[in-house]
Amino acid sequence: MSKPDLKTALASIQKEESLDDNWLSRCHEAINQQALTTPWYVKAMLGFSAWLAMVFIIIFLFASRLIRSEEAAIIFGIILIPLACLIRNKSNHEFQKQMALAISMAGQTLLYLGILVATKNSRDSDGAMTAAVIAIIVSSVLIKIYPDKIHRFLSTVILITAMVVIETRLHQPILFNVLPMMIGALAIYLTTHEISLLQKSWSDIVRPVQYGLLFGLMLICLPSSSYLIREVILHSHYYLSTIGIGLALLYLEYHILKKMGYTLTEKTSLLITGSTIIFIIATLQAPGITASFLVILLGFSSGDKVLQGTGIAFMAWYISSYYYSMNISLLEKSISLVATGIILLLTRKLLRRLRASHA
Amino acid sequence: MSDHLPGDQKLLNTLFKNELLNVEQYLRCKKKIGLTPDLNDWRLFLDIFLLFLGTSLLALGIIFFFAYNWQDLHKFTKFALIGSGIFCSIMLTHLKGIDSLGGKAGLLIASILTGTLLAVYGQIYQTGADPYQLFLAWAAFITVWVWIARLQALWLILLLLYNLALIMYWSEFISTSMSGSFLFSSNPLLYRLSGFSSIELNELLVLCNGLALIIWEAALKKKRTGFSDRWGARVLATYIVIMATQTWLSMLFSYNTETEVGNVLAVITYIAVITTIILYYLSKVHDLYMLAISYFSITVSLCALVGKGINDVVAGFFVLSFIALGLSSAFAISLKKTAQAWRAEHEQA
């Protein structure tokens, strides 16, 4: 059965609570005054165009010889980022918005590259590490002060990338695998604490940061899907990532079950929790699969179809690439896949049976 | 869950921030419009998700099992295995009915397995057939199923097969000088598919797929069974715009100058495709996505045109950055105005 639109829902609330017509007309007025939300593909178009402009700006700065050294790059970066913030905060016009976005991205690229090159040959500091720490600080500040959804999304992705760089430079696989759990937990927090964040007027920040976190989570799981990268580049214990994301996933399931009125000791809760644990164990070496499951669940619980679609696409990618590149025999892959498939189908059957017995 | 408008969450937040809704009303409103799933929504979601994922993993596991034993299997066993897969899929369609989700999935699997059967046949008997013949035969065999399945995904697969057959035929018999991308040089199929250099082939692909899009839109307009939403048309239009833009860029940067006629046609094709899409989706069918991809294509194409023409690198890139920003901003404003006009039109109706 299709559900009503917003205006119909408001009308039914008015009826249920016997609110006056003035309340409804004020609601309608607020809705009509609100500009239309930009669809994701228009945001993507604007994002790509800003990246294109950013590349042209950087080439221009280098070609014009305005930047001849890493110090000059850093100085330009330091000038361009606040300039972008100023333009964006002063104007809401589309051209200024796009220009500010491109200038900010160009400034950040120059700043991080400048720091990377300047400290590369230094004995006392690690260039990549220094650039990453600066990137974390700058991105965190920009998420708060730069009032633009695309920019906040990009800043979150840059922040996560910088964290990965730091953890890779520290050569601590444990740390590398803790990050996905932290990101997953933060994304869950943003969904489950929606009301309190709204009351603190954080609503404009929450959604782009959540998108950035989940997109970043999908990205940092990418190395696990390639056998080549797994073995040659990172030497990481991916099962730790899976356990971390799995714990976040179990917490989310617990939260949803509680919201739906189930206690932990009920058969339905036990069945869902048990099959999730088996699913996590079966995909222990593929954190991307558990992560995309988390994204799908978060997308569904917040009625967000873009998140659901992204999660499904990534899940298809992770399942196919993981099983294709896994360094075990085809027979072992076959057993693992069949076992997981049967467990999921059995879970479905048992859930239906439980539902029928309750009805 | 309902197909709520993408802006509903933002509108709700606005009402909450303006203190027109309290916490309890906000949550109830979210539930009413389907932004928060209720118990039934969760049950349906879990049911579909577990069925889909469980079946996919099980099917993959079975495929891997046979792949493990493939070399040791007798040729007739191989044919029997794939054949029985096709038979079971068709039986599933028969039992569940053509209009059910299971029935459609059955025809989808049978269509894919037909290609596997043809490939295995060619492999065992070393038929020496050209690759285009495989794709053409595959497409021909499944055409009737696609017709009766009335599933957009299957129509797209059929179109993909005809596209592949055409590309293979072209690279085999008409233009063997397609350079392809070095990135895909290790894989013959991908190498041929990445043949960005044949302008004439791209023009032909744009023309064929353009015709397919016209038929697709007609089916959507007449509300033919299976053509209830626009995602298939959007995928097809995206492919056409990418091919037309690629043709234009190839011509511009002279990756292939086989014939002058082809170059002139590339310009005409590009202008015709973009103009038609913009005019049609502005006036006849309201689809913001189609306008957005066309506008983005124009931004890229104009940047390429200006970039090609400039002699002064310094000034050129400075100007280019402004062109990219100016065009994308202008298009964003235009898209917003268009959406507002459509909304007003919709509310009046």
Image: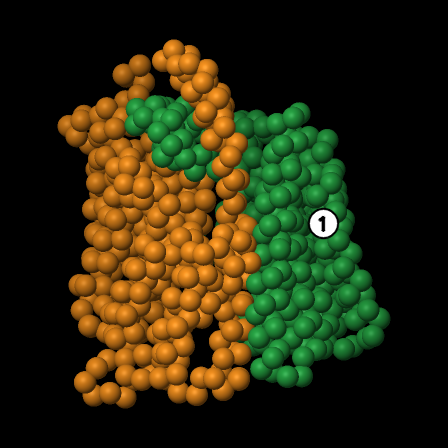
Chain colours: A orange, B green
Residue type indicated by callout 1: Ile
Is residue A190 positioned above or below B294 on the image?
Answer: above
Location of the N terminus of chain B (image quadrant): top left
Q: In this rendered view, identify the residue nearer to me: A265 or B102.
A: A265
Q: Residue at x 40, y 61 (%)?
A: A85
How many tags in the picture? Answer: 1
Q: Quadrant of residue B225?
A: top right
Q: Residue at x 24, y 80 (%)?
A: A126
Location of the C terminus of chain B (image quadrant): top right
Q: Residue at x 53, y 84 (%)?
A: A63
Dot 1: within a 10 Å radius of its alpha carbon, few (fewer than 14), some, or many (20 or more) residues?
some
Q: In this rendered view, identify the residue nearer to me: A322 or A311.
A: A311
| Residue B310 is at least partly visible in this image | yes
Q: Residue at x 27, y 41 (%)?
A: A200
Mark 1 element type: helix
Q: In this rendered view, identify the residue nearer to me: A88 or B84.
A: A88
Is residue B95 positioned above or below B140 on the image?
Answer: above
Rendered location of residue B128, percent (x, y): 67, 66
Rendered location of residue A219, percent (x, y): 36, 59
Q: Which residue carries the number 1 mark? A: B277
